[in-house]
Image (cartoon, rainbow, N blue to C red):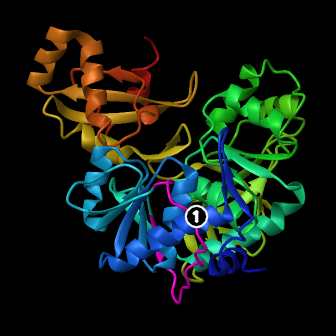
């Protein structure tokens, strides 16, 4: 296994390496180096050690990331830039690297493109910085997950060894954000290390995807189950004249029908990658049949907890060689292969975004109109959240005065301080009292039954 990422980081890109592109611009290795040197010099002049990095444009994000790692800084990646999210982790960072001002009172370095190219040399580095990502912990508070360059390098190298044969001279485009571990690895770090140019924008519309597939003979698409499930209908379920060489999907299992829909349009099913922020990639599959098992990546070992069926693993992406317990229930089908059988905790995926139900319920219960809040995962017509709210006396008055729609919107606005809109509850119920048993435990069945009828 080669040290693909560490080798690239130590030398930097060649002046001719194509780093990124969009419909009106390209960034070469020379321009990228100039931008990295500029940010790196500013970081060296600052005593601040911990820097939050947030930027929608992937090329500028990569500039900030490389500069901070080479400067030995700790790079904090927030899951989003909602005010409530940043407020909750504000004690975790001293400065901000971004293309827009965030968090008054912190040191700030602006990411921008309007730098004159010159013969800057790629910065030397004795000790790389680290990455810190935040994920939804089962406690209801964001959980910090640290990643060293060595851990990230191990994963990038395994991805290249596993999939490079499917990627002939590919350019990379993505429908997912680089602020999360999947997009960070597949859209930024792996392409940089393997000299594959990436689209600096996020692809938001099927028309944009078709535009780029028509331009590039070899294209790698990084996407998610929610987006891929809707794509075949957008393409009229017809075989496309030009298709990506490879489609990756991660963030949750893709259902079998969606996988076959992508095959109908593109000629092959996506390669799905299973993992998490903490673990990195664990396994992969291509659904050529129903109940297709997951195959673990080379150098990863798995076993099943006999007590509750939980997945346990050892991985070079982790900080030590101990067995790590995951809250995914599995059944091992063959050596190195398993099937997923659901989650064992209250962390769920909504639109492929990991979400702590405990955290969202706790935020709801801080509102003066609410006594208690319970969230229910509804599977039909698609996976979405339902909210069961026991209102305070003031809340009852508000419901009577403004109606359900007005109250729904008020509580959604409250949730938007910390959560992205796509993850918010779609259906709301306001019973007189929360269904509980004599011991005060909430009754899951009765909570779900509240949504049987609209």
- Percent across and percent down for residue 190 are 69, 63
The tally of labels here is 1
Q: Residue furthest bottom?
A: 126
Residue displayed at 82% across by 52% down: 170
Name the foreground residue: 182 vs 127. 127
Q: Which residue is mark 1?
A: 117
Image check: 58 left or right of 93?
right
Q: Quadrant of the C terminus?
A: top left
What span is in magenta?
112-132
Q: Quadrant of the N terminus?
A: bottom right
Residue displayed at 81% across by 21% down: 237
Instruction: Please name the predominant secondary structure of the magenta segment in the image.
Output: loop
Mark 1 neighbour density, 10 Å: few (under 14) some (14–19) many (20 or more): few
Secondary element type, mark 1 = loop
Residue 162, image quadrant: bottom right
Question: Does residue 430 appear in the picture of this structure?
Answer: no
């Amino acid at each position: 296994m080669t040290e693909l990422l560490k080798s690239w980081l130590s030398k930097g890109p060649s002046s001719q390496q194509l780093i990124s592109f969009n419909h009106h611009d390209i960034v070469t290795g020379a321009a990228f180096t100039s931008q990295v040197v500029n940010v790196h010099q500013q970081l060296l002049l600052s005593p601040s050690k911990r820097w939050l990095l947030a930027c929608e444009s992937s090329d500028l994000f990569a500039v900030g990331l490389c500069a901070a790692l080479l400067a030995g800084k700790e790079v904090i990646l927030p899951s989003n830039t909602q005010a409530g999210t940043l407020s909750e982790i504000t004690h975790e960072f001293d400065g901000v690297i971004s293309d827009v001002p965030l968090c008054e009172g912190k040191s700030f370095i602006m990411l921008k493109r309007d730098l004159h190219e010159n013969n800057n040399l790629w910065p030397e580095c004795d000790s790389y910085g680290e990455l810190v990502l935040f994920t939804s912990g089962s406690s209801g508070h964001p959980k910090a997950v640290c990643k060293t360059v060595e851990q990230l390098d191990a994963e990038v190298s395994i991805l290249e060894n596993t999939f490079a044969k499917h990627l002939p001279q590919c350019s990379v485009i993505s429908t997912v954000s680089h602020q999360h571990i999947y997009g960070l690895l597949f859209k930024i770090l792996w392409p940089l290390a393997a000299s594959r140019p990436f689209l600096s924008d996020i692809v938001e519309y099927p028309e944009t995807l078709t535009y780029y597939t028509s331009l590039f003979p070899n294209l790698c698409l990084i996407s998610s189950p929610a987006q891929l499930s809707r794509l075949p209908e957008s393409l009229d379920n017809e075989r496309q004249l030009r298709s990506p060489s490879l489609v990756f999907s991660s963030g949750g299992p893709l259902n079998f029908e969606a996988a076959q829909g992508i095959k109908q349009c593109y000629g092959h099913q996506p390669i799905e990658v299973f993992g998490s922020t903490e673990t990195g990639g664990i396994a992969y599959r291509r659904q050529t049949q129903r109940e297709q098992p997951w195959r673990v990546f080379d150098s990863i070992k798995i076993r099943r907890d006999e007590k509750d069926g939980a997945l346990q693993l050892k991985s070079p992406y982790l900080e030590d060689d101990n067995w790590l317990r995951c809250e995914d229930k599995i059944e091992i089908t063959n050596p190195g292969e398993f099937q997923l059988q659901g989650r064992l905790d209250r962390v769920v995926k909504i639109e492929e975004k990991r979400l702590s139900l405990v955290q969202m319920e706790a935020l709801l219960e801080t509102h003066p109109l609410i006594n208690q809040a319970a969230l229910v995962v509804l599977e039909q017509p698609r996976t979405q959240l339902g909210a069961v709210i026991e209102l305070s006396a003031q809340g009852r008055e508000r419901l009577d005065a403004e109606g359900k729609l007005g109250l729904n919107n008020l509580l959604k606005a409250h949730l938007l301080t910390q959560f992205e809109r796509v993850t918010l509850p779609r259906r709301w119920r306001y019973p007189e009292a929360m269904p509980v048993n004599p011991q005060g435990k909430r009754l899951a069945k009765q909570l779900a039954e509240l949504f049987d009828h609209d």
